[in-house]
Image (cartoon, rainbow, N blue to C red):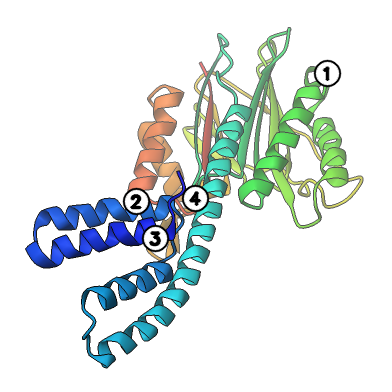
């Protein structure tokens, strides 16, 4: 119910008199409760200063002129403070609204990632995907066709925040709509490039590595679009080699050509896909060397794939004092 200015003034007079005469905790408590009334009645700070001055002049008619004049100064201060406070509250409300929208967007973005890893008799797959901030620019994708072939993709949107999330959603639905099981990796990247080139702003690009594993031949065909090179481990030679796949990033030109590569995967071999958030981990002011990543993988490679990637992630995040500077995605595909 709306109170009149006179009602507010009388209430304040009673609270002020009580406090000045008794100086009790009860008076302070009543003042705190009265502040809630002022907010409900939308009484500004400068209006309260005017009420306080008026009540004092009525209670103490002989107040020194200097004291009375000081309220003019206080009134000006409170008017400026009130304007700044309302602006601060408006910005805070906008920030809270944006934060809420970001929470929803981040939740939606997580739903773009696969909920389960494909299950096959000959592959053991592990993946860790950790965003550096609320929104991630990393994406990974799995598909298994009716012949048991497994398609695996890892991508990095060059950009951050909501634009990267929107771009990620486009990539997901583009990949879902493409007949992947009938496409070779190079052809798939060419199809995706058309989608990106036509729909993504010139300031944003996408790197990607895509591979397809055939359980009948145990061959892994793959192609890359400017993505961070992975690793290939040959068990018989106990040797790591770089998994290079040269190709221009998606969205730069209209009709690029992507080269396709092939690896024969023997029992014990495994493939490492990663984002640049792994290779750009910092120890002090220096980036970690790729050889150091290989050594970490070698230390835990006797473990199942999921435990392996989790242990490597734990070690790398410890080296950075538990603070990621970039989105982190690490994937291991083991032949078992």
Q: Residue at x 32, y 76 (%)?
A: 53
- Ranked by sequence position, the earlier of labels 2 and 1 is 2
| Residue 70 seen anywhere in this rendered image of the structure | yes
**4 or 1: mark nearer the eye:** 1
Query: Is 317 rendered above or below residue 8?
Result: above
Residue at the disc numbered 2: 36
| Residue 243 rendering spot, x and y as whole percentages | 62, 40
| Residue 274 rendering spot, x and y as whole percentages | 56, 40
Rounded to the nearest angstrom, the CA distance separating label 2 from label 1 is: 67 Å
Residue at the disc numbered 3: 6
Residue 66 in the figure: left or right of residue 224: left
Task: Determine crowd level at label 1: few under 14, some 14-19, many 20+ residues with C-alpha closer than 10 A.
Answer: few
- State which quadrant residue 176 falls in: top right
- Ranked by sequence position, the earlier of labels 3 and 4 is 3
| Residue 66 rendering spot, x and y as whole percentages | 27, 92
**4 or 2: mark nearer the eye:** 2
């Amino acid at each position: 119910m709306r109170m009149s200015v006179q009602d507010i003034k009388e209430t304040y007079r009673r609270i002020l008199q009580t406090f000045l005469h008794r100086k009790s905790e009860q008076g302070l408590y009543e003042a705190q409760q009265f502040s809630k009334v002022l907010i409900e009645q939308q009484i500004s700070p400068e209006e309260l200063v005017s009420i306080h001055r008026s009540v004092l002049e009525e209670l103490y008619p002989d107040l020194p002129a200097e004291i009375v004049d000081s309220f003019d100064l206080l009134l000006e201060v409170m008017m400026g403070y009130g304007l700044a406070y309302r602006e601060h509250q408006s910005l805070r409300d906008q920030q809270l609204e944006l934060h809420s929208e970001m929470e929803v967007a981040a939740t939606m973005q997580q739903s773009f990632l696969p909920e389960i890893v494909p299950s096959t008799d000959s592959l053991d797959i592990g993946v860790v995907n950790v965003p550096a901030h609320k929104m991630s620019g990393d994406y990974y994708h799995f598909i298994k066709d009716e012949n048991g072939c497994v398609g695996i993709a890892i991508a990095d949107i060059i950009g951050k925040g909501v634009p990267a999330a929107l771009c990620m959603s486009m990539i997901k639905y583009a990949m879902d709509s493409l007949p992947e099981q009938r496409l070779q990796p190079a052809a798939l990247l060419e199809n995706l490039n058309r989608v990106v080139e036509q729909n993504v702003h010139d300031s944003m690009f996408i790197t990607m590595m895509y591979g397809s594993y055939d359980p009948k031949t145990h061959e892994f065909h793959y192609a890359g679009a400017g993505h961070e090179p992975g690793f290939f481990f040959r068990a018989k030679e106990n040797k790591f080699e770089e998994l290079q796949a040269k190709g221009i990033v998606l969205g730069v030109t209209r009709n690029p050509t992507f080269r396709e590569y092939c690896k024969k995967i023997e029992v014990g071999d495994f493939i490492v896909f990663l984002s640049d958030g792994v290779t750009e981990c910092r120890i002090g002011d220096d980036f970690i060397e790729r050889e150091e990543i290989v050594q970490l993988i070698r230390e835990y490679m006797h473990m199942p794939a999921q435990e392996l990637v989790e242990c490597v992630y734990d070690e790398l995040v410890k080296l950075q004092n538990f603070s990621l500077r970039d989105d982190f995605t690490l994937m291991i595909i083991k032949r078992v």
